[in-house]
Image: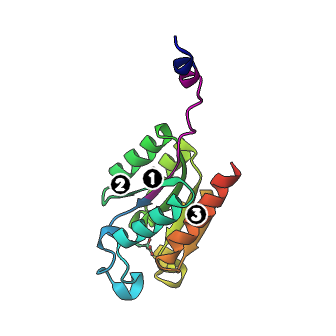
Amino acid sequence: MTRSKRSKSSETPPPPQKRILALHGPNLNLLGTREPEVYGRTTLADIHAAMEARARADSVIVESFQSNHEGQLIDRVQAAASEAVRYIIINPAGYTHTSVALRDALAAVSIPYVEVHLSNIHAREAFRHHSYFSDRAAGVICGLGAYGYLAALEFALSQLRES
Ligand code: DQA
């Protein structure tokens, strides 16, 4: 083996980029046009672009996944465990108030998460006041509109810096 080859093989590979998963539940694909007086006019694509840009500055990858199907969200959470996802930012949308199964998936993978809601669910109908996710969340942000995702991301990035 030549000297140059030996030095090349002994180089330590760069550490893998840290990953954050942003999960969006049913009907959030309609953001921008869906009840804008409640959810604002920012689209999910706009939110993702802003999160991606902010995370890139810290060399962190943010992947966004939206689904209208509970099983697909559960499958995505399970896959996150084998992809070394370090943090999850989740707006379970309507499943917030119904889904034991999605809650169980998050518990199963033990990936810390922040729960985000665009609207203030506590200022709305009584059935929105209970969340199956809040007691296990690192934190809950609601009522700040699209900014809530960036606040959650800022927190997740600070956690990743410390780890
Ligand atoms: C929501 C609040 C939920 O009650 C509702 O079902 C949604 C969106 C929010 O972001 O404010 O779909 O999670």
129 with respect to 64 (left or right):
right
117 with respect to 38 (left or right):
right
Please report contact status of discs 1 and 2: CB closer than 8 Å, yes or no: yes
Between the residue at mark 3 and the residue at mark 2, the CA separation in whole angstroms equals 18 Å
Residues drawn in magenta:
7-22
What residue lies at 58% left-to-right and 45% top-to-bottom? 110
Between the residue at mark 1 and the residue at mark 2, the CA separation in whole angstroms equals 7 Å
Residue at mark 1: 102
On whether ligand 1 comes within 8 Å of the CB at mark 1, the answer is no
Nearest to N terminus: mark 1 or mark 2? 2
Is 109 a magenta residue?
no
Q: In the image as oriented, which residue stretches furthest toward the right?
A: 162
72 with respect to 123 (left or right):
left
What residue lies at 31% left-to-right and 79% top-to-bottom? 34
What residue lies at 57% left-to-right and 66% top-to-bottom? 152
Is 16 a magenta residue?
yes
Q: Which mark is residue 62?
A: none
Residue at mark 3: 134
**Residue 163 coordinates in the image, percent (x, y):** 68, 48
Pick the front one: 33 or 43: 43
Looking at the picture, which amino acid does disc 3 mark?
A: Ser
User: SS class of the residue under badge 3?
Assistant: helix
**Residue 112 coordinates in the image, percent (x, y):** 59, 52
Nearest to N terminus: mark 3 or mark 2? 2
**Residue 83 coordinates in the image, percent (x, y):** 47, 40
Q: Residues within 10 Å of mark 1 (few under 14, many from 20)?
A: many
Pick the front one: 53 or 157: 53
Can residue 135 be spotted in the picture?
Answer: no
On whether ligand 1 comes within 8 Å of the CB at mark 2, the answer is no
Looking at the picture, which amino acid does disc 1 mark?
A: Leu
Residue at mark 2: 70
Between the residue at mark 3 and the residue at mark 1, the CA separation in whole angstroms equals 12 Å
